[in-house]
């Protein structure tokens, strides 16, 4: 009698995305600036800098998802993934306004946020994802989404609790909308994304998603720095 074995070849590549997500968390846990945020010990100036840099990349999320979907439809690629990009663009729409509200409650005007220079890591992040969506492999942005949503699942909720408990930042209870919003919902998003991505069996596209996830993992620690 032959023993039946489960074919996991279609699933194994998603494990590589998960490794990148875990590596990002480990890197940030070892980074002093990120660790201060996670532990609630960050001061008001550093927290506002982090939120402002986050604003500068989050504002691109919905436009990039929409561009990737439109290009996939033009190319006739993966209807299910194209629809996932549409869903994710709707999920992320307006999240930059959460950041503006948080910063306003820290005393920052929208004009100050807009005029704050992008750090080099944010510039590189935006440029990379513009490239992949416009002329590279359009599904690659989902690799970026995977590691960032995984980070939110692992750290956003605990970070909010520690920031509120520490109380080092004036008005902090009104300045955690963005973190709280992502910590609350991204768990379901990661599971849904992983399930859909398991249907992607083109090695070139798998490699593109993994590469995009790795690029995001390498750039993200720089979001805490001025340059």
Image (cartoon, helix red, strand yellow):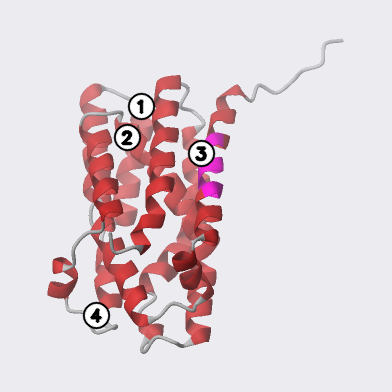
The magenta stretch spans which residues? 16-23
Residue on which the image places disc 1: 78
Tell me the CA gap for discs 2 and 4. 35 Å
Front: mark 3 or 1? 3
Label 3: few (<14), some (14–19) or many (≥20) C-alpha neighbours in 10 Å:
many
Residue 78 among those drawn in magenta: no
Q: Are marks 2 and 1 in contact (CB under 8 Å)?
A: yes
Q: Earlier in the sequence, mark 3 or mark 1?
A: 3
Question: Could you tell me which residue is drawn at 52 percent across and 54 percent down?
Answer: 27
Front: mark 2 or 4? 4
Disc marking residue 17 = 3
Q: Mark 3 falls on what kind of element?
A: helix
Front: mark 4 or 1? 4
Q: Mark 1 falls on what kind of element?
A: loop
Residue nearest the viewer, comparing 212 with 150: 212
Label 1: few (<14), some (14–19) or many (≥20) C-alpha neighbours in 10 Å:
some
Q: Mark 2 falls on what kind of element?
A: helix
Name the quadrant of the C terminus: bottom left
Residue on which the image places disc 2: 82
Q: Earlier in the sequence, mark 4 or mark 1?
A: 1
Question: Could you tell me which residue is drawn at 27 percent across and 67 percent down?
Answer: 52
Label 4: few (<14), some (14–19) or many (≥20) C-alpha neighbours in 10 Å:
some
Residue 223 x/y as whole percent = 34, 59
Residue 125 x/y as whole percent = 29, 47
Disc marking residue 104 = 4
Tell me the CA gap for discs 3 and 2. 19 Å
Residue 18 among those drawn in magenta: yes
Q: Quadrant location of residue 207?
A: top left
Disc marking residue 145 = none
């Amino acid at each position: 009698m032959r023993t039946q074995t489960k074919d996991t070849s279609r699933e194994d590549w998603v494990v590589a995305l998960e490794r990148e997500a875990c590596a990002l968390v480990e890197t940030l846990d070892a980074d002093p600036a990120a660790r201060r945020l996670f532990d609630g010990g960050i001061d008001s100036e550093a927290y506002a800098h982090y939120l402002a840099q986050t604003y500068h990349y989050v504002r691109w999320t919905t436009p990039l998802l929409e561009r990737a979907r439109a290009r996939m439809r033009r190319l006739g690629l993966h209807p299910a993934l194209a629809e996932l990009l549409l869903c994710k663009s709707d999920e992320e729409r307006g999240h930059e306004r959460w950041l503006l509200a948080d910063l306003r409650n820290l005393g920052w005007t929208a004009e100050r946020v807009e005029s704050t220079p992008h750090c080099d890591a944010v510039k590189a992040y935006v440029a990379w994802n513009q490239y992949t969506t416009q002329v590279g492999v359009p599904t690659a942005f989902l690799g970026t989404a995977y590691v960032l949503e995984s980070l939110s699942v692992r750290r956003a909720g605990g970070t909010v609790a520690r920031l509120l408990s520490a109380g080092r930042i004036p008005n902090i209870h009104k300045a955690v909308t963005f973190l709280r919003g992502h910590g609350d919902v991204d768990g379901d998003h990661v599971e849904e994304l992983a399930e859909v991505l398991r249907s992607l069996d083109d090695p070139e596209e798998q490699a593109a998603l993994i590469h995009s996830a790795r690029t995001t993992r390498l750039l993200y620690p720089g979001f805490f720095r001025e340059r």
